[in-house]
Amino acid sequence: MPEQRSQPMASFGRGGAGNISSAQDSLPPDLVTPTIKSNMYTTGRGGQGNMAKNNPYSPKIARESQDVVAPPRRLSQGDFHYGRGGAANVLKMTAEEIAQAKEGNARREREMREQVQRKTEPKE
């Protein structure tokens, strides 16, 4: 009978016994976001226009400039395919599901616009 382990295990990578270890070993010492220590930092995908000078006395500004929140995924508003193809991988939506998706997408877009407006409004 196999021995029962009381300690949780964690798997890393694509598999194989060499990628399994104690979950305790994998815990980071803290989850603090590091500050940028270089004189310059990037704020976009690259290019001179996306370089900014780092103010070491205001690390929060540099961090916020780099933290970009991806827009939420839009819900499909009609039939769609998933998997590798074939008729069995088509999801056909009802008229009610399509209406709910359209309403949900419109709500998310409004929320995103409001969030951007709040971030870009001048602070008094």
Image: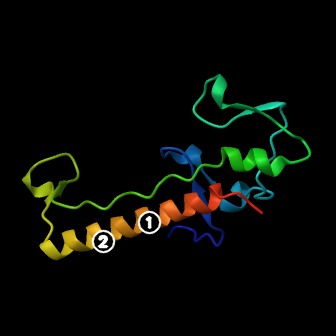
Select label 1 or label 2 by which is in front. Answer: 1
Foreground residue among 24 and 100: 100
Identify the residue at image location x=50%, y=45%.
Answer: 16
Q: Amino acid at mark 1?
A: Arg
Please give the name of the residue rendered at 49% of the width and 60% of the height, measured from the top-left corner: 113
- Which secondary structure, mark 2? helix
Which residue is tagged 2?
103
Compared to residue 102, the image places residue 13 above or below, namely above
Q: Nearer the viewer, residue 109 or 13?
A: 109
Q: Which kind of residue does numbered mark 2 sit on?
A: Glu
Please tell me which residue is depicted at 15% across the width and 67% down the height of the picture.
93
Residue 24 at x, y percent in the picture: 71, 62
Which residue is the extreme one toward the top? 48
Q: Could you say which disc has been placed on residue 69 in the image?
A: none
Residue 88, quarter of the rendered image? bottom left
Residue 11, visible in the rendered structure = yes
- Alpha carbon distance from label 1 to label 2: 11 Å
Report which residue position mark 1 lands on: 110
Give the crowd class for mark 2: few <14, some 14-19, many >=20 residues within 10 Å.
some
What SS does tag 1 mark?
Answer: helix
- Name which of mark 1 and mark 2 comes first in the sequence: 2
Quarter of the picture containing the C terminus is bottom right
